[in-house]
Image (spheres, grey):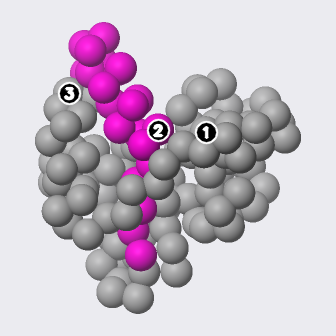
């Protein structure tokens, strides 16, 4: 199964797998699953760490390099992802999270998240 991880799961996994919810850890450890990160997550980290947000204190370059080195696939932001955002109900306000949801839906892959608001969207969102 192809799995797109939301930004917080990526940050937590890079810091310490103990911070990652148990259900997500099991899916991430399963060798049959392909793990992906979105360029949107790296963009979000770069912006929010620059704003000194306490929950985004990670270097975007180091995070990206670590994900690639650990076998994660990099999902680019394509125009088909961006235009799909207008089909989403306005449940979640964060533009980065809305883009992740649209990417997962367009690509037909599961989005792993611990965000209960994101999990309210129909489709392939998987709350862990």
Q: Is residue 42 left or right of residue 40?
A: left
Task: Give the residue drawn at x 54%, y 32%.
Answer: 96
| SS class, disc 3 | loop
Percent x, y of residue 9: 36, 51
In this rendering, is residue 15 above or below 61?
below
Judged by its main secondary structure, the magenta piece is helix
Q: Is residue 7 left or right of residue 68?
A: right
How dense is the environment of label 1, judged by Cα within 10 Å: few (below 14), some, or many (20 and up)?
many
Q: First in sequence: mark 2 or mark 3?
A: 2
Q: Are marks 2 and 1 in contact (CB under 8 Å)?
A: yes
Residue 34: quadrant of the picture: bottom left
Which mark lies nearer to you, 2 or 3? Answer: 2
Task: Give the residue drawn at x 47%, y 38%.
Answer: 40
Query: Which residue is under mark 1?
Result: 99
In this rendering, is residue 14 above or below 95?
below
Q: Is residue 31 left or right of residue 102?
A: left
Query: Which residue is under mark 2?
Result: 40
Q: Is residue 25 magenta?
A: no
Which mark lies nearer to you, 3 or 1? Answer: 1
Q: Which residues are magenta?
A: 34-55
Dot label at residue 57: 3
């Amino acid at each position: 199964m192809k799995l797109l991880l939301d930004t917080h799961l990526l940050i937590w996994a890079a810091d310490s797998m103990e911070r990652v919810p148990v259900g997500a850890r099991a899916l991430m450890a399963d060798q049959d699953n392909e793990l992906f990160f979105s360029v949107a997550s790296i963009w979000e980290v770069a912006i929010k760490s620059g704003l000194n947000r306490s929950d985004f204190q990670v270097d975007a370059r180091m995070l990206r390099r670590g994900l690639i080195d650990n076998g994660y696939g990099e999902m680019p932001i394509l125009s088909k992802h961006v235009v799909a955002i207008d089909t989403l109900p306005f449940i979640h306000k964060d533009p980065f999270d809305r883009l992740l949801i649209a990417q997962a839906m367009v690509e037909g892959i599961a989005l792993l998240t611990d965000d209960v608001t994101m999990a309210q969207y129909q489709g392939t969102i998987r709350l862990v």
